[in-house]
Each structure stands twice: as structure tokens, then as C-alpha cells.
Image (tube, grey):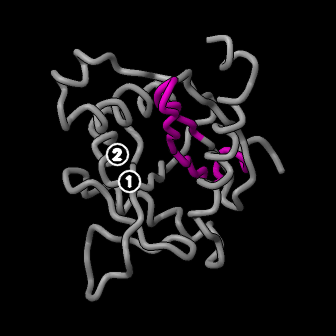
């Protein structure tokens, strides 16, 4: 496959986070090709807000940490940019307001036509309401993903890799 063909392949980003009660939250971004094969993986160091931050941010702390601190950092850091970032938690959809890449979360099959929802592989995806063009942009490439693709499976790999990272010697000495 030529370099241009590889660049034209639809790349998916899977963004997940694992929380460790002692060290904080660590995030991971796995970028794969359309078949789910890894192209690049990046993770953050654990982020642990102090008590003052917990008080001041209140209920907005977790979405802020996940989207702005962890999500945006990982997308800035990754050299193989995905065409679509998939997330498991709706609270991360606001990541889209901080990056130029479509972000989608998993939803149940819609009961009727919904212009914000698109089927990719085996899953139905919802896009940020303020970025209506994202669905159409992704739809143009979504046919490259096999209909049998389980887009939830890579999250298991990320969580396992992050858990291993937290067990590593660098994490223990931090």
C-alpha cells in the first residue's frame, strides 16, 4: 500500500480514562486504522486535582479534566491524527469544542431518523449538536469501516494498557 493510500484510510481515535484513587485519572488515546489495528497510542501521566480544585470546579471538574486537560492534550500530542474520536461518556462530547476533529459517543439505535446519529460498524454514534457537519463528514468515510466492526472493543484494550501503565515502575515511584 502506498503512503497516499495509507493516508486516505479512515483512522479512528478511541479516547478513554482510568481512575486510580491514589494517583488520579490517566487518559489514553488509541488511533487505529479502519480495521482496528493500532497506528499509535499515547497516554497521560496521572492527573489528580487537589481539594481546592475539587471545591472550586464542583460538578464541572470531571468533564473539564476529561475533555480539556486529558482529551485535548492527547490529541495535540498524537502524530497520527484520527478522522473521528470515539468516546464512551457523553460528558466528553464537549471535547469537540476544543479540537478540530469530530467527536462521537455511543447511543442506542434510534427509533426514527435522527440527523445527529450515524451507524458505523456495529454501533450507532451521536455527534455534538453544535457541529452538525461532523456527521456528514464522517458518513463520507464510514463505509470504509467493516459492518462487523465492534467499535467498543478497543476501549477494553486501552483500559488494560492504562492499568498496566499505572502498575509500572515509573508510576510507583511518582
Residue highlighted by disc 2: 92
Identify the element where label 2 is drawn. Answer: helix
Point out residue 96 in the picture as x, y percentages from the top left corner: 32, 42
Residue at the extreme bottom of the image, as rendered: 111
Identify the element where label 1 is drawn. Answer: loop
Looking at the rendering, the stretch of residues picked out in magenta corresponds to: 5-29
Residue highlighted by disc 1: 89
**Are dots 1 and 2 in contact, CB under 8 Å?**
yes
- 27, 77: nearer the viewer: 27
In the rendered structure, does residue 53 fall within the stretch colored magenta? Answer: no
Point out residue 123 in the picture as x, y percentages from the top left corner: 49, 73
Residue at 39% over, 71% down: 118
In the displayed structure, 17 sits above or below 139; it is: above
- Prevailing secondary structure of the magenta residues: strand
In the displayed structure, 169 sits above or below 103; it is: above
Point out residue 12 in the picture as x, y percentages from the top left corner: 57, 51
- In the image: residue 132, left or right of residue 144: left
- 10, 22: nearer the viewer: 22
- 144, 75: nearer the viewer: 75
Residue at 67% over, 36% down: 41
Residue at 39% over, 59% down: 105
Tell me the quarter of the picture where residue 59 sits.
Answer: top left
Q: Residues within 10 Å of mark 1 (few under 14, many from 20)?
A: some
In the rendered structure, does residue 15 fall within the stretch colored magenta? Answer: yes
Tell me the quarter of the picture where residue 117 sits.
Answer: bottom left
Quadrant for the C terminus in the image = top right
Amino acid at each position: 500500500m502506498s503512503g497516499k493510500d495509507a493516508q486516505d484510510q479512515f483512522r479512528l481515535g478511541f479516547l478513554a480514562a482510568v481512575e486510580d484513587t491514589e494517583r488520579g485519572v490517566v487518559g489514553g488515546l488509541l488511533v487505529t486504522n479502519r480495521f482496528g489495528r493500532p497506528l499509535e497510542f499515547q497516554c497521560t501521566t496521572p492527573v489528580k486535582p487537589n481539594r481546592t480544585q475539587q471545591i472550586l470546579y464542583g460538578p464541572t471538574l470531571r468533564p473539564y479534566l476529561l475533555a480539556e486537560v486529558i482529551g485535548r492534550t492527547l490529541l495535540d500530542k498524537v502524530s497520527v491524527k484520527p478522522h473521528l474520536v470515539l468516546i464512551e461518556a457523553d460528558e466528553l462530547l464537549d471535547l469537540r469544542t476544543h479540537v478540530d476533529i469530530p467527536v462521537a459517543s455511543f447511543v442506542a439505535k434510534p427509533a426514527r431518523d435522527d440527523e445527529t446519529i450515524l451507524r458505523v460498524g456495529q454501533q450507532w454514534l451521536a455527534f455534538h449538536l453544535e457541529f452538525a457537519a461532523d456527521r456528514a463528514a464522517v458518513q463520507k468515510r464510514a463505509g470504509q469501516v467493516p459492518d462487523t466492526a465492534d467499535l467498543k472493543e478497543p476501549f477494553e484494550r486501552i483500559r488494560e494498557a492504562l492499568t498496566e501503565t499505572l502498575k509500572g515502575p515509573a508510576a510507583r515511584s511518582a
